[in-house]
Image (cartoon, helix red, strand yellow):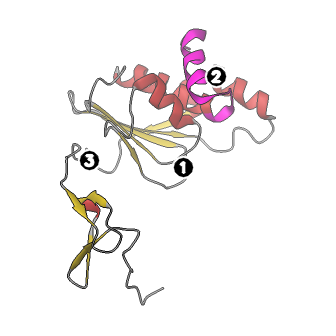
């Protein structure tokens, strides 16, 4: 395991210790071990997280994958799964928490297990079924014809022939 100082960095970013943060912490350790990945200066390392839970904070703090930089993408399946792409080497790896290990553990025992168990006991590792995400792009700002606020061109919709933002757009859906 990484030293206590690295764990403390993740805890400081997140605000407290918890099993969820321990999952993300060990994911960072696993991707470092399996792919040789460290801190991402730009978009050379991309993480696709399938959850919006505590572990994502460890990925931001320790690998520098962030939404603002465009190298942390959210795919809301609700799974404790994280896919990493290394644009320099072409490698990709999906890391998923194995279910059911915490059935007979309290919160503290679960966190201790996550921080100390062998990586291969905690996670499954597979090649993801999708390819590298597109690099982040800059888009022109378009002003919504209804509210007057600007939004990225790629997020705008046409309604009655006018550009409107997601908040103002009336979705047409007759199928449930």
Q: Is disc 2 in contact with disc 3, using a CB cutoff of under 8 Å?
A: no
Sequence-earlier tag: 1 or 3: 1
The local crowd at label 2, few if under 14, some if 14 to 19, many if 20 or more residues have their Cα within 10 Å, is many
Q: Quadrant of residue 6?
A: top right
Q: Is disc 1 in contact with disc 3, using a CB cutoff of under 8 Å?
A: no
> Which SS class for mark 2?
helix
Q: Is residue 6 magenta?
A: yes
> Which SS class for mark 3?
loop
In x, y percent, where is residue 166? Answer: 37, 68
Which is nearer the eye, 12 or 146? 146
Q: Is disc 1 in contact with disc 2, using a CB cutoff of under 8 Å?
A: no
In x, y percent, where is residue 162? Answer: 22, 78
- Could you give the CA–CA distance between mark 1 and mark 2, rounded to whole angstroms? 19 Å
Q: Quadrant of residue 22?
A: top right
Q: Is residue 41 above or below residue 135?
A: above
The stretch in magenta equals 1-20
- Could you give the CA–CA distance between mark 2 and mark 3, rounded to whole angstroms? 30 Å
Residue 161, visible in the rendered structure: yes
Q: Is residue 154 magenta?
A: no
Q: In this figure, which residue is indicated by the disc labeled 3?
A: 131
* Residue at point 36%, 21% (across, down): 39
> Which SS class for mark 1?
loop
* Residue at point 33%, 74% (across, down): 146
Q: In this figure, which residue is indicated by the disc labeled 2?
A: 115
In x, y percent, where is residue 110? Answer: 73, 31
The local crowd at label 1, few if under 14, some if 14 to 19, many if 20 or more residues have their Cα within 10 Å, is some
Sequence-earlier tag: 2 or 3: 2
Q: Is residue 163 left or right of residue 121?
A: left
Q: Is residue 39 left or right of residue 12?
A: left
For residue 79, the mark is: 1
Which is nearer the eye, 164 or 79? 164
């Amino acid at each position: 395991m990484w030293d206590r100082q690295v764990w403390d960095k993740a805890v400081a970013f997140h605000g407290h210790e918890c099993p969820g943060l321990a999952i993300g912490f060990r994911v960072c350790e696993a991707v470092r071990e399996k792919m040789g990945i460290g801190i991402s200066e730009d978009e050379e390392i991309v993480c696709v997280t399938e959850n919006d839970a505590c572990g994502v904070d460890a990925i931001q703090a320790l690998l520098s994958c962030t939404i603002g930089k465009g190298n942390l993408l959210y795919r809301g399946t609700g799974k404790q799964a994280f896919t990493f792409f290394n644009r320099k080497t072409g490698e990709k790896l999906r890391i998923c928490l194995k279910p059911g290990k915490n059935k007979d553990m309290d919160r503290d025992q679960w966190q201790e297990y996550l921080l100390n168990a062998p990586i291969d006991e905690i996670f499954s590792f597979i090649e993801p079924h999708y390819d590298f995400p597109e690099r982040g792009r800059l888009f022109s700002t378009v002003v919504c014809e209804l509210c007057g606020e600007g939004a990225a061109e790629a997020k705008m919709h046409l309604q009655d022939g006018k550009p409107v933002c997601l908040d103002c757009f009336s979705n047409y859906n007759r199928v449930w």
